[in-house]
Image: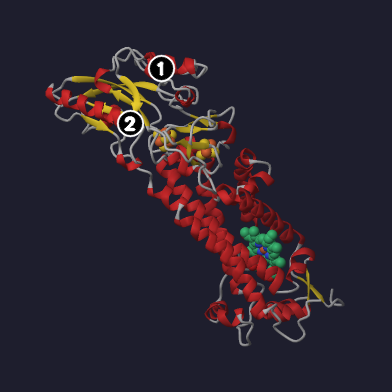
């Protein structure tokens, strides 16, 4: 884990603020869905760089998609979504699917194990397997359904945005492999500019609803998309309005204070009651022996 | 036993079940607190480390539920609230301040009965909400989200009840710890704390 070279901004289950002091340029990955050709070079590059063993036990489902879903050893996936448009035409939206590296990561909020999830100042959200206890709370907390539990090790894993490569000044492996420039990597500022330019191009070419997917419900993400039909992100397998859920906020906020009140208030209350009223002596003869 | 100045309050089976619930429950509270509060995470280290409590908390939870079910079955009849109990509850302030004039209680007083009912209900809620947290991959996300809320609220209520219970049993009502350990109490203790029950036992030797 390159925790040495990347400034840490937030740590799961921390009792003190994260040690990071320096600001770092915020990085992002841009996925221009309109220029993905479904070659899956990025999938291969990811498996190779991260040295992930392939799963060969999944059934073939008659789809171009490599796997039905992400798994603990398969961190990104080109989804081959087949969409029937209103005019009866079939559209094949090939959409890269992986951790979104949320600015307000639900996984990190939910995690009870100190240091099992960290967020770097550059925006990358990383799982630190040696601190993970395998509770799966991050799976519940993530609005994008990304973390995957390895049943053998009881640890969770997901896309790291190649934090190891980024720490060394390289771009993520998937970006390196992409032959069409569908994927690009850089500062989020710059990529948002490029994305909006691309959206203008698409609008001119007959995609009036083209737009950028950078959902505000999770504070924006460090993986952003250009979608030809941004009004219907579900068509690309992306949630329409992902949010950190209110249950998670309640659980990690007010309920904690209620808990403190009950535990410490209860103990304190009992102590004060004892000082004031002492043990119960209902009758003279009550000695209890 | 007419010779002795003692009467039996709890049978061996009752005591065994009670302490089985108590020990499993305390483990669950400690390991649960570690999973709930970062500032209590050190409890996880004391209990063998995070992955260990992640593994054992649900298993011990099921064990506790089984013991609690046993406790429910054994005491359910003794724990029904009657009219005097309801009066007792209305005058609970007097009981808390140790004043005279509290309605006489039977084998258990109304506070104990309420604790019993609360713990039984919380035990059931904790079990039901715990299962989706145990096997997150088998249940839907929204069910898991609700489960976490229910699990935590039920746990907090149960912990509050436990604090009051331990305090009453060890510090306030002297002699009840001996009752739960040896099974026996003095007649004087019985008359003082559970007069209706004392009369009943004395009538049927
Ligand atoms: C380690 C902690 C505990 C201690 C020291 C403790 C102590 C006691 C004592 C001394 C009694 C006898 C009261 C009497 O004679 O009237 C008792 C009864 C009882 N205990 Fe516990 N107990 C503990 C944990 C628990 C837990 C976790 C539960 C349930 C979840 C529980 C449920 C009960 C019930 C229902 C009774 C009978 C009625 C009552 O006294 O409230 N106890 N306990
Ligand atoms: S997409 Fe999910 S796993 Fe990735 S940072 Fe956001 S909440 Fe965490
Ligand atoms: S499974 Fe691991 S990373 Fe996920 S919430 Fe639990 S401890 Fe944190």
Q: Which numbered mark, 1 or 2, is in the foreground of this view?
A: 2
Q: Residues within 10 Å of mark 1 (few under 14, many from 20)?
A: many
Q: Chain of mark 2?
A: A
Which residue reaches farthest front? Answer: A22
Seen at 38% across and 38% down, the residue is: A103
Q: Dividing the image into four equal quarters, which quarter contains ligand 2?
A: top left
Q: Quadrant of the rendered structure where residue A70 is? A: top left
Q: Nearer the viewer, residue A151 or A231?
A: A231
Q: Which mark is residue B40?
A: none
Q: Quadrant of the C terminus of chain A?
A: bottom right
Seen at 41% across and 24% down, the residue is: A69
Q: Are marks 1 and 2 on the same chain?
A: yes
Q: Is residue A224 left or right of residue A150?
A: left
Q: Which mark is residue A188?
A: 2
- The residue singled out by tag 1 in the image is A43
Ligand 2 is within 8 Å of the C-beta of the residue at disc 2: no
The secondary element bearing badge 2 is classed as: helix
Q: Quadrant of the N terminus of chain A?
A: top right
N-terminal label among 1 and 2: 1
Q: Residues within 10 Å of mark 2 (few under 14, many from 20)?
A: many
Q: Where residue A10 appears, x then y in whole percent?
A: 47, 41
Q: Is residue A120 left or right of residue B59?
A: left
Q: Nearer the viewer, residue A227 or B59?
A: A227
Seen at 47% across and 50% down, the residue is: A252
The secondary element bearing badge 1 is classed as: helix
Q: Chain of mark 1?
A: A
Residue A135 visible (yes or no): no
Q: Is residue B81 left or right of residue A201?
A: right
Q: Where residue B12 appears, x then y in whole percent?
A: 77, 60
Q: Is residue B184 left or right of residue B53?
A: right
């Amino acid at each position: 884990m390159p925790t040495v070279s990347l400034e840490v901004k937030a740590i799961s289950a921390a009792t003190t603020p994260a040690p990071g002091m320096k600001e770092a340029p915020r990085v992002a990955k841009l996925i221009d869905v309109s220029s993905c050709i479904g070659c899956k070079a990025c999938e291969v590059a990811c498996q190779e760089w991260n040295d992930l063993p392939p799963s060969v036990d999944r059934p073939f489902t008659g789809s171009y998609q490599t796997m039905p879903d992400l798994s603990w050893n398969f961190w990104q996936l080109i989804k081959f979504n087949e969409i029937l448009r209103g005019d009866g035409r079939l559209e094949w939206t090939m959409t890269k699917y992986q951790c979104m590296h949320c600015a307000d990561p639900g996984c990190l909020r939910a995690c009870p194990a100190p240091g099992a999830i960290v967020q770097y100042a550059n925006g990358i959200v990383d799982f630190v397997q040696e601190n993970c206890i395998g509770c799966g709370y991050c799976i519940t907390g993530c609005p994008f359904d990304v973390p995957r539990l390895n049943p053998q090790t009881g640890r969770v894993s997901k896309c790291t945005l190649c934090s190891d490569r980024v720490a060394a000044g390289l771009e993520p492996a998937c970006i390196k492999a992409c032959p069409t420039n569908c994927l690009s990597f850089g500062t989020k500022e710059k990529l948002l500019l490029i994305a909006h330019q691309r959206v203008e191009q698409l609008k001119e070419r007959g995609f009036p609803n083209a737009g950028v997917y950078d959902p505000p419900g999770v504070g924006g993400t460090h993986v952003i998309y250009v979608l030809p039909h941004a009004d219907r992100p579900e068509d690309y397998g992306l949630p329409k309005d992902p949010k950190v859920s209110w249950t998670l906020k309640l659980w990690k906020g007010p309920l904690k204070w209620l808990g403190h009140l009950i535990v410490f208030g209860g103990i304190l209350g009992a102590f004060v009651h004892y000082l004031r009223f002492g043990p119960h002596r209902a009758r003279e003869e009550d000695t209890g022996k | 036993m007419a010779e002795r100045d003692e009467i039996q309050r709890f049978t061996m089976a009752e005591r065994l079940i009670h302490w089985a619930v108590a020990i499993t429950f305390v483990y669950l509270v400690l390991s649960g607190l570690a999973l709930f509060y970062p500032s209590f995470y050190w409890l996880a280290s004391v209990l063998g480390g995070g992955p260990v409590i992640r593994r054992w908390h649900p298993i011990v939870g099921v064990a506790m539920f089984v013991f609690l079910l046993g406790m429910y079955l054994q005491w359910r009849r003794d724990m029904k609230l009657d009219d005097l109990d309801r009066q007792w509850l209305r005058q609970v302030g007097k009981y808390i301040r140790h004043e005279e004039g509290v309605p006489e209680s039977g084998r258990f007083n109304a506070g104990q009965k309420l604790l019993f009912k609360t713990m039984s209900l919380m035990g059931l809620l904790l079990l039901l909400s715990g299962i989706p947290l145990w096997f997150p991959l088998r249940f839907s996300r929204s069910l898991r989200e609700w489960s976490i809320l229910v699990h935590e609220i039920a746990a907090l209520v149960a912990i509050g009840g436990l604090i009051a219970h331990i305090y009453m049993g060890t510090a306030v009502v002297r002699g009840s710890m001996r009752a739960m350990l040896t099974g026996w109490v003095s007649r004087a203790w019985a008359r003082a704390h559970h007069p209706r029950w004392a009369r009943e036992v004395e009538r049927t030797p």
